[in-house]
Amino acid sequence: MQIIKSIWNFFQSQILGMGWLNDLIGSGLSALGLDTTNRWTGSIQFFLYDVIKITVLLCFLIFLISYIQSYFPPERSKRILGRFHGIGANCIAALLGTVTPFCSCSSIPLFIGFTSARLPLGVTFSFLISSPMVDLGSLLLLMSIFGAKIAATYVVLGLVIAVVGGTLIEKLHMDKYVENFILTAGSVDIESPDLRKKDRLVFAKEQMLNTFKKVFPYILIGVGIGSFIHNWIPEEWVAMVLGNNNPFGVVLATIIGVPMYADIFGTIPIAEALFYKGAQLGSILSFMMAVTTLSLPSIIMLRKAVKPKLLALFIGICTVGIIIVGYLFNVIQALTRIH
């Protein structure tokens, strides 16, 4: 058992976490005559390490996820979702969202397409919530920072929010609050041709490059903010705002996250820096969920597709769900003494 644990710890710290890369960069900076204990040098080390680590993991994961996604084009996804009913359909929609490496804005066109195809509204909202909030890539990246249990719990609770939110919207019969042009748009269900393995590899490569181009600026911004927090913000400041002594830290983190726009890959370096500065786990993960699911640009785009009452319900469900999950993670952190 101890051998398995040691192998897993090595995988988490050196393969996923790329601890060797951080040591290599630190040695390189020292060889240049720079003091790695200095704040400026520490900021450079954090920035280089996180940019390289996230970029490598991002490209690998997006390629893998896109290859899987090649088996689930929109037409096939519609047919799959159409076979299920009730809460089972919401669960399948939420799970399908995990294999779509999209930010919240990129998920909305698919949501519109599914709604136009007359799929149940609650099912399409389960997809819309889960797609930006959780995916296979985020699972592995979160594992590199918080460990497997926390990463898996984050994904599971994100799926719960998606299923519960979609089910509630369905039970409230909110179809009349979808804009008319979507309900009358119709749907052209074109059968996707069978792709050869080479075609799928080309598709995965193109998706990886396109996603990387879109995401990389946010990675740079996120790592830059994380580097600043990690090396320049005093721990007591972070602890005062988002630590154990502030019972409203989760709510504050959620509110701060909403106006921002990034996908989960851009928020992870910020989360990492906050974690090491003493912020509560629940506040950190609530911030991540709010940024990825309730970004202001995505809300503006969604308003074009749904009427204010349905939009307000969507925002309310996600906000309450995120806050509840945040406090659950704070309890988990207190019970397991994660630091």
Image (cartoon, rainbow, N blue to C red):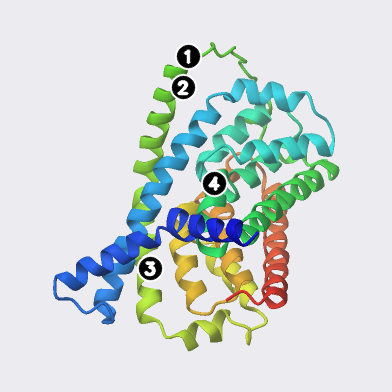
> For the residues marked 4 and 2, what is the alpha-carbon distance in whole angstroms?
25 Å
Q: Are marks 4 and 3 in contact (CB under 8 Å)?
A: no
Q: Which residue is mark 2?
A: 200
Q: Secondary structure at mark 4?
A: helix
Q: Amino acid at mark 2?
A: Arg
Q: Could you say which disc has been placed on residue 104 in the image?
A: 4
Disc on the earlier residue, 2 or 3: 2
> What's the CA distance linking mark 2 and mark 3?
36 Å
**189 and 304: which one is in front?**
189
Which residue has dot 3 on it? 225
Q: Residue 33 placed where, x, y %?
A: 14, 75
Q: Is residue 140 above or below residue 183?
A: below
- In-front residue for pair 16/255: 16
User: Is residue 212 toward the left or the right of residue 240 in the image?
Assistant: left
* Quarter containing the C terminus: bottom right
Q: Quadrant of the N terminus?
A: bottom right
Amino acid type at mark 4:
Ser
Classify 10 Å Cα crowding around label 4: few (below 14), some (14-19), many (20 and above). Answer: many
- Disc 1: which residue: 196
- Residue 30 percent across, percent down from the top left: 20, 73
Residue occupying the point 33% across, 68% down: 46
* Label 2: how many Cα within 10 Å (few below 14, some 14–19, many 20+): some
What's the CA distance linking mark 1 and mark 4?
30 Å
Identify the secondary structure beneath mark 3. helix
Q: Are marks 3 and 1 in contact (CB under 8 Å)?
A: no
Contact check, label 2 and label 3, Cβ < 8 Å = no
**CB-based contact (under 8 Å), mark 1 and mark 2:** yes
